[in-house]
Amino acid sequence: MAGGPPFELRATHEGLDALVRAIRQEEDGKELRKDLAKNMREALKPGADQAKSSIMGMVSLHSAQPALRSSIAKKIRPEVKLGGRWTGARVKAFKTKNIRGFPNAPKRTNSARGWRHPVYGNREVWVHQRGKLEWFDKAFRGREGIYKQAVHEAMEDMARRIASRAGNGS
């Protein structure tokens, strides 16, 4: 899972494509897709909560507004796509638009390289700053299997639901 945000579960791709095709053939396929996506997001929610907790643990020396840590935490959420450019489930730290002119805050605070920015009130003086090293990556390290299994279980539940309909003739 190197490389930082987002944490992705790509191993489910082939099985998920087949499941989505089966859902499309069902009469209420749109509702089934919504249920599957919801259940997959729920499976990843503990990981997102762990990542949020991790960024909130980053040291803050200033009380600048809007608060960077809470702004980043608000942008961390599970994402599920069922078709399109990619199919899968992931926890993603989205860009923080309009937060102190720092849209890449999740990426930069996770990076060992840190970031450079001008000192407030003095545009000629720049400083180098580091965040909490790998706060996003560490939230998932060692737990990848747990989240992958939870997503697989959500997929299997939906497959059983569809299979039971076929057996009942519904």
Image: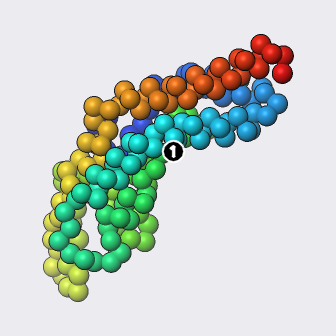
Residue 46 at x, y = what percent?
Answer: 41, 42
Seen in the image, is 27 located left or right of residue 150? right
- Give the residue displayed 77% in from the left and 20% down from the top: 165
Seen in the image, is 18 located left or right of residue 139? right
Residue 56 location, quadrant:
bottom left
The total of numbered circles placed on residues is 1
- Residue type at numbered disc 1: Glu
Instruction: State the residue lying farthest toward the bottom.
Output: 121
- Give the residue displayed 80% in from the left and 16% down from the top: 168
Q: Nearer the viewer, residue 125 or 98?
A: 98
Residue 146 at x, y = what percent?
Answer: 38, 29
* Mark 1, other Cα within 10 Å: few <14 / some 14–19 / many ≥20: many
- Give the residue displayed 20% in from the left and 78% down from the top: 119
Seen in the image, is 139 located left or right of residue 30? left
Q: Nearer the viewer, residue 166 or 112?
A: 166
Seen in the image, is 120 located left or right of residue 140? left
The colour scheme applied to this rendered structure is rainbow
Residue 113 at x, y = what percent?
Answer: 18, 54
Q: Which residue is mark 1?
A: 79
- Against 12, is 100 above or below? below
Residue 20 at x, y = what percent?
Answer: 66, 28
The quarter of the image holding the N terminus is top left
- Against 88, is 162 above or below? above
- Give the residue displayed 32% in from the left and 32% down from the top: 143
**SS at circle 1:** strand
